[in-house]
Image (tube, rainbow, N blue to C red):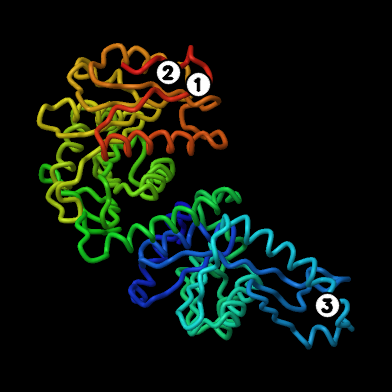
Amino acid sequence: MQFTDRIDAGRRLAESLRDLHGSDAVVLGLPRGGVVVAREVARALDAPLDVIVVRKLGVPSRPELGMGAIGEGGVRIINEQVMRFEGITEADLMAVEERERDELERRADRFRSGRERIPVAGRTVIVVDDGIATGSTARAACQVARAQGAARVVLAVPVAPPDTVAHLREDVDELVCLDTPDDFFAVGQWYRDFRQTTDDEVVACLDDAAAAHARDQAASAPGHHGLAGCDDEVLVECAGVRLPGHLTVARGAIGVVVFAHGSDSSRHSPRNQLVARVLNEAGLGTLLFDLLTTEEGGHRENVFDIELLAGRLTGATAWLREQPEAFGARIGYFGASTGAAAALCAAADPDAGVTAIVSRGGRPDLAGPRLSAVTAPTLMIVGSDDHYVLDLNRAAQAQLQCANSLAIVQGATHLFEEPGTLHQAAELACEWFVDHLTRGATPEPYPFTDPDLNPPMK
């Protein structure tokens, strides 16, 4: 089994943990990559998310050999057998523990941004990582959770070697592992995208999860009226064709954004999934779906058939409006590459009822004369180093009659693969959608550093 990325792994893992929904569970992610996976699990279970920071206590002469582990709350787990065999004195242990305790507290403060640790005493704790190799860190985390008072400890991971899984079952009440391949060499081999997770991404996951959980609690409070919630795989009925998709709508969401992916892409696009996650964390719902069937996608001409793609987007929007999870919601379109052209064409229909549009690295030129008929406020995001597409967007902006803005992300090329550029694009899209789907107001032009690359909004 191979996972697209940690988000995909988390969503699949959550399916195997559905029986814990509503169990007052707490999800604890192991930093760094495990927190991204845990975020999806917590979202699906409507559970709070926290980080579990543990530090191994290594033998002074052989740091790779653990003689114990420590966790927050003064938790200390010691392997007396290793200490005796290695001749470790209490003074040796204290020196190592003091150094590791300082590092543990530093990391915990960094990741939580000053929030208190979520209490786990008497609760079910789900410890999540993005995969396990030797299992030493996962074992320590489960032992720490138990020592902090967890009534039940569940270890959940997407992939691990079978022998490690067998040994870890002794430390937990339940172990959920989606795949235990015999030819396991490293966790990363089971992911298409296994790029390193940064401290900032961990902080963002935890911050956004805390905000989302607070919103969910408020939305479920007596007297609250808002959209129903869901986070499910769906089949979008569109002109007699059933297209697979994923619909995410938190209770009380402020609107839903429908994604139109670019050529040679699908609902599994890691770039669109990152943008969708940022929107979800801001309280927006999202629908990612395949614009073409598998058979249709095999014919190159369909990938650039903007009329066909726009028709599918229109059909998907009509389907969405009939779903109870999105009933009465304002709709936005997010299009990438050729998907942006499809979004603009679909929005040009007078009956489209689209509230806002964002194009990332889009080809608005392919929308042709329909550009002038678009009435929804439109933001076009382009990389400063994507020169050809940047020129096309500037030309398209001159044809737009609606409120619009052109945002240039410095140092980015067409796919926004440069560090930080895709997240910047996602944040720009999020601001635009929140502004328009909540208040319908026209925001001020974005404050970019180079006014020459920053045409004023019409």
Q: From the image, which quarter does the C terminus lie in? A: top left
Secondary structure type for disc 3? helix
Percent from the top left, x then y, of residue 284?
31, 47
**Earlier along the polypeptide chain: callout 1 or callout 2?**
1
- Left or right of 454, for residue 31: right
**Residue drawn at 72 percent across, 71 percent down:** 56
Of the image marks 1 and 3, the number of the one nearer the N terminus: 3
Q: Look at the picture and state if 28 lies above or below 236.
A: below
Asked whether disc 1 touches disc 2, contact meaning CB atoms under 8 Å apart, the reply is yes
Q: Position of residue 155 (x, y in %)?
A: 51, 75
Q: CA distance from mark 1 to mark 3?
A: 54 Å
- Residue on which disc 3 sits: 93
Which amino acid type is shown beneath numbered disc 2? Leu
The answer to whether residue 188 is seen in the rendering is no
Secondary structure under badge 2?
helix
Quadrant of the rendered structure where residue 43 is? Answer: bottom left
**Quadrant occupied by the N terminus:** bottom left
In the rendered image, which residue does mark 1 sit on? 384
Where residue 429 sits: x, y (%)? 38, 35
- Count of marks overlaid on the render: 3
Please give left or right for residue 27 compared with residue 333 in the image: right
